Amino acid sequence: MTIDPSWYLTLAAVLFTIGAVGMLVRRNILVMFMCIELMLNAANLTFVTFSRSLNDVGGQISVFFVLVVAAAEVVVGLAIIVAIYRRRIGATADDQHLLKG
Amino acid sequence: MGSLTSYLPIFVLFILGFLFAALSIVASKLLAPKRPTTAKEAPYECGIVPTYELPQRFPVRFYLVAMIFVIFDIEVIFLFPWAVVYNSLGTFGLVEIIVFSLAVFFSFIYLIANGALDWGPIKVQRPASESAPRTTSSTVRRVSSNNEAA
Amino acid sequence: MLATTIILPTINYTAILPELIMLGGMLVLLGLVAVIPRDFSTKTYAGLTQVIGTASLVSSLVLWHDVAAHGAFQAVAQAVDVDGFSVFFLVLVSAILIVAPAFAADYLHDEGIEGAEYFILALIAGAGAMLMGAANDLILVFLALEILSIPLYVIAGLNARRATSGEASMKYFLLGAFSSAIFVYGIALTYGATGSTNLADIAAFLSRNVIATPGTLYAGAALLLVGFAFKIAAVPFHMWSPDVYEGSPDGVVGFMAAIAKVGGFAAFLRVFVSALPTLSSIWEPVVWVLCALSLIAGAVIALSQRNIKRMLAYSSINHAGFILMGLIALSSRGVASSLYYLFAYSFIVLASFGIVTVVAKANSGSAEIDAFRGLGRRSPVLAVFFAIFLLAQAGAPFTTGFLAKFYVVSAAVAAHSYAIAVIAMLSAAVAVFFYLRVVLVMFSGSETEDAVGTPEQHPIVLSRWVWSGIMACAAATVIFGIYPLPLINFARAATLLFR
């Protein structure tokens, strides 16, 4: 049985949707982080799949950059969380209500 | 390529691992004697009865080191491809990678200079009250300023 | 060993010199902070940042001369475009980085945020914004977007002593990272549909081929659009911006607002005009809706704001709607008017937030509109300058604000987009109310309110830094408002060389 590229693309789309929905419904900041990671990795999977089916190395190189950016984002996000934790306990987005909106 | 059979060993291993974990948990549930008392269920604190809920927090320092690790770890992603084709890249590649490394190195120096990697007891960054005599009030103030800095 | 030979790209370093100056200057500051035993004052770092900005401005102008003489070219393996469009943004971002430190230096010092961190982050963000305008490859656009955004998340949370600052930073980060993830998935889908991430290659592919099942491409383009709409805070993707503007440290909000809009629009315009022009019949209606919603919602919600930072945030959303009109016109004239608008907006918003900073500081940190009551009596000159910037935003004649609005509306009319032109003029009329309200509050009603325990009415003392910033912005706003020819020619040339 061979695996068609569309399987990978579908998996990536499902992962991306899970991440996006999770981002919108979950309220724990760390879980929201993980959702963002899930979305970025869905994009990576899409890149690699297209790179394979187009026989073009550009997509794989893109994955490198996305990975690095994802790491940088996580670090900055964690730093922001740590800075907030130091001021108060609890890490849910609903606790962040000083600013309306 | 693209055949599912090549994934079979991994799949089998996955099943085995899952079964082993499930069996261990179930067996321990079934076989182990259970006689819970309040003393047993209390958090372990060297035999002293806990008086308040533990603040379940790691020192910020751990997060800091973890974050720095992640960044410097991921930088290697650019060094590996360069190392693989080092010979055919020649001087151009060497110069580029030196520039890249310099950028990373500068941020490393910044981290060291800011004391991000100092381990051991937390030091107060600014000299809080070196000359002032240590009275109760000054100590209290230093502790609170310490908390702000940490 | 590998038998294949690698074709080494020739890298024309002069083509990316302004970006390199920004990043090199940033590294110098970083090393300086690390090595010197005791930090210099923020004013020293602000001065150094201005020097770096000036150096990059000079090299941008040299590059402009090159482009004017020899035409546009591409560099760094076709990933970077050097044309009038990119040079326009190089010049604009350099200018922002010269002006912005003037507003931040005193504020950071007074708030106890010593050190060079803000200036280092600002330089990184500046380099990102420059690359947004120059990028000719979607992956580079993504990298530039992140180079621009990540420092801004940190800048929003710079004031660690205020809870609102951390909260603003958190919100900005979560929504920014969310939009980045959407954006990068859009890039992946576009890459899959067209086989390249290079903007010119994408455009060439789309003009040569008819795609049988365009679903992937449409989805990719839609996700790219959503990603950009988040960055420029177009309604309905604007939720973060009022909170972030209100919570962020006062002295740096102007910079954040200007640089994020400039960078976001730079890449937005280039990607949609130069890579996806063949799809314009698909994306133009969507942009039309975004534009109309931003125009209406920005103006209407701003009416009900009591906090002046929130009011300015909603007025920025309104401005984003105006700038989008240039894209709807689908003409080089439209893009030129967008560029002119961006230039005008950057300096007006820098100065407006700069003045809000000093007034809020004199009123114990309150940025409510009531804090401006009687400012005309208290510090007449400052009030007059603030009135100029507010009226410029409202579109008063003899300012860049008027001409900017005039150019985008006339570009839309020339493209027969009458409906959006009417919406724009109505929203401008609504917007006049909330700008004028602040002006009226400043110049009236101080003696009636005096009875109800007002703060002492001594004049607000401004440092030379803030004055120099205000004067520079006022000069840019008024001089180019009365004599706009050089600027509009610059913007037109920028789009003439725009493929």
Image (tube, grey):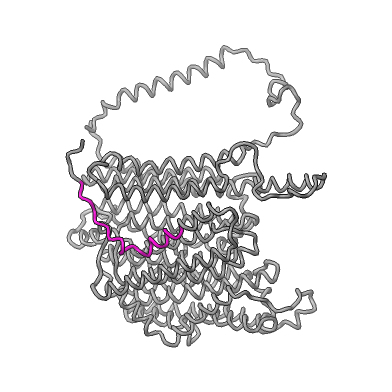
Residue C408 falls in image quadrant:
bottom left
Question: Which quadrant, please, contains the N terminus of chain B?
Answer: top left
Q: Position of residue C307 (x, y in %)?
A: 63, 69
Which residue occupies 67% across, 66% down? C365
Residue C203 falls in image quadrant:
bottom left
Q: Position of residue C11 (x, y in %)?
A: 27, 57
Q: Position of residue C36 (x, y in %)?
A: 55, 54
Q: For residue A84: magenta?
A: no
In the image, A49 versus A20, the foreground residue is A49
Q: Position of residue A39 (x, y in %)?
A: 41, 46
The relative height of residue A50 versus residue C29 in the rendered view (above or below) is: above
Which residue occupies 24% across, 56% down? C10
Residue C223 falls in image quadrant:
bottom left
In the rendered image, is residue C99 in sight?
yes
The relative height of residue B132 versus residue C460 in the rendered view (above or below) is: above
The relative height of residue A75 versus residue C28 in the rendered view (above or below) is: above
Q: For residue C18: magenta?
A: yes
Specify the segment rendered in magenta: C6-26
